Amino acid sequence: MRQLLYISSATPDAAVDVGIILSASMRNNRRDGVTGLLWTDERRFLQVLEGESGAIQAVFDRISRDARHRGIVVLHDRAIAVREFGSWDMARRGRDDTADAFDTRMRHHLAAASPTVRGTFEGLIAARRAA
């Protein structure tokens, strides 16, 4: 199994409909046996993907070709023995969510993650809170 963690930004003039992206991603990833976690504020994306190496590469290749993304940086890419995210979760702050409620939900999703993955997501949460 493979785990890949990346961060990217939305292209400034791209029409980003996160709802459509989430629906397509959940359908495709369920079909391909890919799990993970996506954090987005609709301008930045931080995602960890887990699954068989070929499936992860196919997902990442699609993301890399997607004109709505720019500045894609792989933060880590490693072999794993077991999944840290057993179900596909999309973390997105809803209109009615407070920042604290969203952060609490994210920390719940990250409870079983490796220190590297958890630290990366928590660093982005802290940066957003400080802004």
Image: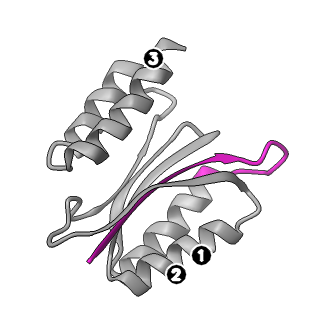
Q: Is residue 54 left or right of residue 84?
A: right
Which corner quadrant of the image does residue 111 belong to? top left
Q: Residues within 10 Å of mark 1 (few under 14, many from 20)?
A: few
For residue 108, above or below residue 127 = below
Q: Give the residue pinned by disc 3.
A: 129
Seen at 42% across and 74% down, the residue is: 29
Q: Residues within 10 Å of mark 3 (few under 14, many from 20)?
A: few
**Amino acid type at mark 3:** Arg
Would residue 112 be seen by someone viewing this image from the given angle? Answer: yes
**Amino acid type at mark 1:** Asp
Q: Give the residue pinned by disc 1.
A: 61
In the image, farthest residue toward the right: 13
On the image, the x and y values in percent for residue 16 come to: 71, 50
On the image, the x and y values in percent for residue 54 come to: 42, 86
Label 2 and label 1: CA atoms lie apart by 5 Å
Label 3 and label 2: CA atoms lie apart by 33 Å
**Amino acid type at mark 2:** Ala
Would residue 98 be seen by someone viewing this image from the given angle? Answer: no
The quadrant of the picture occupied by the N terminus is: bottom left
Q: Earlier in the sequence, mark 1 or mark 3?
A: 1
For residue 55, above or below residue 122 = below
The stretch drawn in magenta includes residue 7: yes
Asked whether the residues under the numbered discs 2 and 1 touch, taking CB atoms below 8 Å apart as contact, a structural biologist would say yes
Q: Nearer the viewer, residue 120 or 23?
A: 120
On the image, the x and y values in percent for residue 108 come to: 20, 39
Label 1 and label 3: CA atoms lie apart by 31 Å
For residue 100, above or below residue 42 = above
Seen at 45% across and 26% down, the residue is: 96
For residue 12, above or below residue 18 = above
Per the rendered image, the range of residues in magenta is 1-18
Q: Give the residue pinned by disc 2.
A: 58
